[in-house]
Image: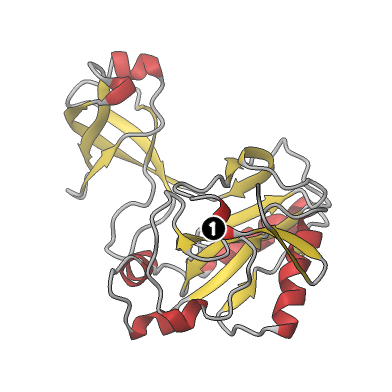
Amino acid sequence: MFKKLIFLGFVCQSAWAIEISKPDLFLLKTYDDSKAVTGWLMSEKLDGIRGFWDGQKLLTRSGNKLNPPQWFIKNYPPFALDGELWTRQNDFENISSIVRTKNPDKRWKLITHHIFEVPNQQGGLLDRLSILDVYLQHNPVAHLKVLEQTPIKNKPQLENFLSAVINQQGEGVVVRNPDSLYATGRLDSALKVKRYFDAECTVIKILPGKGKYLNKMGSVLCQTSAGKQLKIGSGFKDKDRANPPIIGSKITFKYYGFTGKGNYKYPVYLRIRPK
């Protein structure tokens, strides 16, 4: 039986009642222009490390326990929070280095925790986020922030917001239905909006698959005209994996900018380039 804590008018399950390994989180689907999102809320899609607070400890999306300094989580609330551990745009490698270290150091002072969901609470998205707002009014935590949500008035406003984020080297935008109750899994009410680029490369090696792709193609190693090599493993349909592009063929792929090391970010196969 769960014990329950009453705090500022909300209910939370005590964290010791369930041993959490991999948290059950909501995931984003991809936005397309056919989706009507006027009246929804938009926020920047922060390119950091997902940080799920279960009321006692900080976990990654995969359920790995993070080791922040005690001062970082000292005044965190006794209820669950879901957000992004972040520093600034285009800084993923540095963020990952800071938050995944076993022995936390002073670099954690660069980290802010931007909360975009307060799980298991009642009401729409803004109602749920207001629970954290109320908590922080009584228990300020400088690095714990509610991620700003902006109402979408029309599609041009969304496009302008996306352009502003991209121009600042951000990853993209998240749009969410404010009336949807809390749910987990991949949701139609939570969508990622990105602007991608495309390029071409020549296939130089077929790499074998594992698991459900055993005895099929897993990914391809290819090279751009500038001599840069990259591995592409997503975007392929089952028929593509059964009959992969031949070595020497040119393929088109999409990507979402570059990492801090200059590598293509999230390369995805699109098509074989016609001869």
Kind of residue at disc 1? Trp
Residue 113: percent from left, percent from top: 54, 71
Query: At 34% from the left edge and 72% from the top edge, which residue is drawn?
Result: 98
Quick one: quadrant of the C terminus?
top left
| In the rendered image, the vertical position of residue 27 relative to residue 234, given as above or below | below
Q: Can residue 151 be seen in this view?
A: no
State how many labels appear: 1
- The answer to which image quadrant residue 144 occupies is bottom right
Query: At 33% from the left edge and 21% from the top edge, which residue is drawn?
Result: 212
Residue 270: percent from left, percent from top: 41, 31
35, 93: nearer the viewer: 93
Q: Can residue 14 be seen in this view?
A: yes
262, 124: nearer the viewer: 124
Residue 19: percent from left, percent from top: 49, 50
Scheme by which the image is coloured: secondary structure
Neighbor class of circle 1 (other Cα within 10 Å; few <14, some 14-19, many 20+) is: few
Report the side of 216 relative to 197 (left or right).
left
Report the side of 3 relative to 45 (left or right).
right
216, 196: nearer the viewer: 216
Farthest residue, direction front: 1
Report helix, strand or loop for mark 1.
helix
- The answer to which image quadrant residue 174 occupies is bottom right
Residue 222: percent from left, percent from top: 21, 37
The residue beneath circle 1 is 16
| In the rendered image, the vertical position of residue 274 relative to residue 45, given as above or below | above
Report the side of 267 relative to 13 (left or right).
left
| In the rendered image, the vertical position of residue 81 relative to residue 248, given as above or below | below
